[in-house]
Image: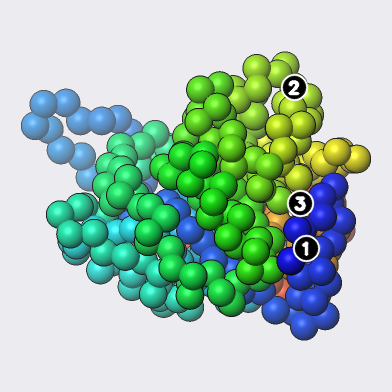
Amino acid sequence: MDVAPRAGSRSKAEEEHAMGDVMKLGCAGVHVLDHLVTGIESIPEHNDGQVVETICATAAGTAGGTALVAARLGAGVRSIGAIGDDVFADTLLTLLAREGVDVSGLVRKAGHRTSASVLPVRPNGDRPAWHCIGANAAFGLADVSGELLRDLTHLHLGGPEFLGGDAAASLLARARSSGATNSVDVLAPGDPGMLEWIAAALPHTDYLLPNHEQVLGFTGADDVVTGARALVGAGAGCVAVTRGARGAVVVTADEVVEVPAYAVKVVDTTGCGDAFSAGFLRARSLGLGLREAAELGCATSAQVIGGLGTDAGAYTLDDVRAFAATADRLGMR
C-alpha cells in the first residue's frame, strides 16, 4: 500500500476523491459537550447570581467539533472516541447525529463522565473555560476496531496526547495501511514536553493542524514559519497553522503559503480551529491546492466565529464558497 506523498502533492486517494466528490472522514479522539454562556459581565462572588443572555450546548472538541463542521460541508463523517454513561453523553450523541454524523464509533465508558466544558463568552469573543476531561482520558486503541477504519478515506486524530505518541502513531499507520490519508490536531497548549510526548506520531502524520501558540511553544521558535518548518523536519508532511485574526500559514518541505482571515464580526471564537480543520481537509479531499484549502478553512472558520458555538448558523459547502467569493470581491480580507 502506497504511503500518502508529502509536500502538498495529491495522493492517489485524493485524486479519486476529487473525481467522485467523496469523502469518508473518521474523526477520532476528543469529543466534548460545550456549555456556552453569553452576556457575562463578571463571575458573581459568594452566592450571588447574575442574569445572562444565553446558555446553550454544542458538540465540540478537536474530533467532535471537526466532525460536526465537516458533515455540514458534505463529508460522510464517523465519530470515534469515548463518552460517559451520563445524560451529557445522550446530548452529545443527539447533537452529532442530527448533523448527519455516524456516532457508532463513540464508546460509552461505564463509570466515566462525558467530557464537558463551561465557557463564559466575553463581549469580544474570548472564552475562558472550565473543563472536565472525563471519558476522553479513557479512550484507547482497543476502542478503534478495524471495521471503524476500513472504509475511511481520511482519519483525523484530535488530541493525540491522550493516546501518547506511540499509540497515536500506531492508529495513524493503521489508517494509512487501509488507504486513508490522515491529520492530527493537538488539544493541549504549546509546550516542548508535549511535543516530546507525541513526537512518535509526527512521521506518520500527513497534515498537522496546530494554532500559532502551539507551534511557538512546541518548538521555541521566534516565528510561526520557522516553527512549522521544525515540525516538518520532525516528520509531519504538511503543517497548517491557524493564527486567529491573521489567518493561516501552510508549510511543507517545499513551500510556504500564507492566507489572511476574513473580516467578520466576532461573536464567539469557540470551535474556530476545528472549523478551519474541517474546511481545510474537505478542500483537500476535493483535490484543491494548499492555498485554496487554507482559504476554505478560513472561510469555514468565519461561519463559526460569527455565531455562538461550533454549530453556529446553518451552511453548506456551497454557502461557504459563496461567502468566500463575495468577501473576496468586497475586499473583506
Q: Disc 2 marks which amino acid?
A: Asp
Residue at image coords 53%, 55%: 171
Answer above or below: position of 172 versus 222. below
Viewed as shown, does residue 216 lie left or right of 68?
Answer: right
Viewed as shown, does residue 253 lie left or right of 305?
Answer: right
Element type at marker 2? loop
Q: CA distance from mark 2 to mark 3?
A: 19 Å
Q: Residues within 10 Å of mark 3 (few under 14, many from 20)?
A: many
Front residue of this view, candidates 96 and 188: 188
Q: Residues within 10 Å of mark 1 (few under 14, many from 20)?
A: few
Front residue of this view, candidates 323 and 280: 280
Question: Where on the picture, by quarter, is residue 4?
Answer: bottom right
Q: Disc 1 marks which amino acid?
A: Asp
Element type at marker 3? helix
Residue at image coords 65%, 22%: 219
Q: Residues within 10 Å of mark 2 (few under 14, many from 20)?
A: few
Q: Which residue is mark 2?
A: 223
* For marks 1 and 2 on the same chain, the one whose residue lies earlier in the sequence: 1
